[in-house]
Image (cartoon, helix red, strand yellow):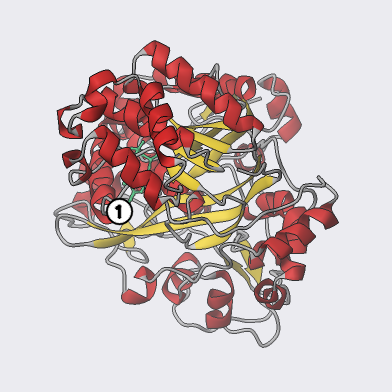
Amino acid sequence: MSGVRGKWKLIGISHQYETVSKKGQKRELLALDRVSLTQSYGEIVGLIGGEGAGKTTLAHILLDRLTPTEGLVTGSADRACWLRLPNRRSEERTGEGYVTHQLTKWGISRKKLPQMVEKIAEFAELGELFFQRIRSYSKAEKVQLEISLLLHLAPTLIYIDDSLLTVKEDFYIKVFLFLEKLKELGSSIWIETNHVKRIEGYCDKLLWLEFGQVKYHGSVTDVLTHYYEYYFQIQRRPFEQQQSFWQKGYRGQYLSQEPVSKEIIEPRRPVLKLVSSAEQEDMEKAQSRDASTTETLAMEEPVIEEQEQSEDRLADLSRAQKNRLVMKQANLKLLSGVALACLLVGGAFFALKHSPIMAGKQQTAPTTSSVTNSQPNSDTFPTSSSSAATALGVVPETHQVQRGETLSQIGDRYGISLRKLRSWNQLETDQISEGQVLKLRASVETSITTAIATPGPLTYQVKGGDTLLDIAAAYGVSLDALQAVNQLSDERIYTGATLRLPDTAKAPTTNQSSEESKESTVAPTPTSTPEPVTQHIVAKGDTLYAIAKTYGVEVMDLQKANHLQTEQLYLGQELILP
Ligand SMILES: Nc1ncnc2c1ncn2[C@@H]1O[C@H](COP(=O)(O)OP(=O)(O)OP(=O)(O)O)[C@@H](O)[C@H]1O
């Protein structure tokens, strides 16, 4: 195999799945949300994050088995494969028969076959078992067979899942020693795991995903510092609060609460999937970031496993969702459109310049955007422009209407349905005027805060992603009370619907758990002066700036009071209000 140099570049990768509830309700689930990073070849990357964080989805995209709904992937892998156990049909073969069959499929010549089979058998440490049917193997033995085969194919991209953890310790170490050799040859190695401890010593980098978003990507030490701090903060809270916290994050991944029309279900056309080698070469040259040469970008269809992908996905879905409902993860939406664009444009600019598709899109620059927060990412692109962000599918928070623009044009530009645009901006018609600032995202917190800040009837207009529980918690009323005043028999609510708030509703505290809210139904009315608040618990979507604004304090004072060196916040973090 020839050595491979260069980098993977993932720019604004998003992926949506259509899910169907037991009641037949269709909803869009954002499994990956604007994932952007660069990752050098020749390194082992540990992919961590809770169940349903998007690891497998990302793997499918890297392996070119799935086209992301949005975003750009550049990378070079002329032999890509991942560790999957032999399927049922293959299990009828002997280890030897299976290995021979797979090697033949990969185009290994007849001459080389016997020698390679022998090497693989030796590495697999299966002894006589190698000549018996795979169906009699234990899971660990199947993994030993499969990983030995994969390693000897010397792939340029190898994706290893958690099943590697089932093998005995000495075999495990042997695999990593072999991976070190592959690294030297330039292979990209991605290892997915929910058991960080087992892999941390072997990885060069960690990529931590939570609810489809990149939390951190960088050195093992850096990422783990944040990773443990994050989980520690969550674990310190009472169990009910933890559950409510995970559930909230889980629900937040759904783009809509109501049945979606066909228009929304259909995935948006990806901006660009793989760029050609020439384009990538141009991009890298122009960036002067490295003098790497690029090889063919066509990722070969891995023939190692023959299982139907759809079957796997269904299994994954039920497992992930079940587990997550019990308790997992959190969603800290740290990336904003423009902050992300800042990371992207350096790399993106040249891709845009050299890609005819992107070049066309560059004309349509969003005119406004607002920064919420950015997130550390060790490999980032320099400076930004909003046009690049738009072209890459990175949507800013707002858009200022230009002369002659229509709502539908704006929707098309950002890939947002008219229905969502209307609902997020509380538009009764499609009439918009020049200079008007339109929201391009739904935000429970923002809308709740706005609602309470504006004197008027005690109502709340449901936004995409809201749940009844969130709204009840935010206003400090019980779920029952909210259901009762709105005569709701269940928790279903629809985007755009106007909900009455019980008279006991108080100023929103978005970080309140549902349990807390149930206990605090006796509260001042929204018109009365709220009690002085001394602390704020960081909730989803919070930024230091937004918190400071809400409480009428200076960002610097907030930082000082909480000894914060940066603007980085964590979900559940308790902030003292100066
Ligand atoms: N084919 C699919 N259709 C609908 N939803 C899906 C599909 N595949 C995955 N999902 C959902 O997308 C989200 C991300 O799933 P993914 O399998 O990528 O996560 P993961 O990090 O690999 O999780 P795990 O560690 O449980 O394997 C989950 O909520 C999952 O339920």
Q: Amino acid at mark 1?
A: Gln
Q: Residue at x 20, y 40 (%)?
A: 93
For the N terminus, which image quadrant? top right
Quarter of the figure that contains the C terminus: top right
Query: Which of 230 and 494 lies nearest the eye of the viewer?
Result: 230
Q: Which of the two residues, 530 or 212, is positioned nearer the viewer here?
A: 212
Where is residue 530? Give x, y as percent. 49, 36
Number of residue marks? 1
Q: Is residue 477 visible?
A: no
Query: What is the crowding at mark 1: few (fewer than 14 residues within 10 Å), some, or many (at least 20)?
Result: few
Q: Which residue is mark 1?
A: 309
Q: Position of residue 31 (x, y in %)?
A: 41, 50
Q: In the rendering, at what x and y percent does residue 33 appear?
A: 50, 51
Q: Nearer the viewer, residue 578 or 321?
A: 321
Determine whether 427 is above or below 382 in the image: below
Residue that appears at 27% across and 48% down = 312
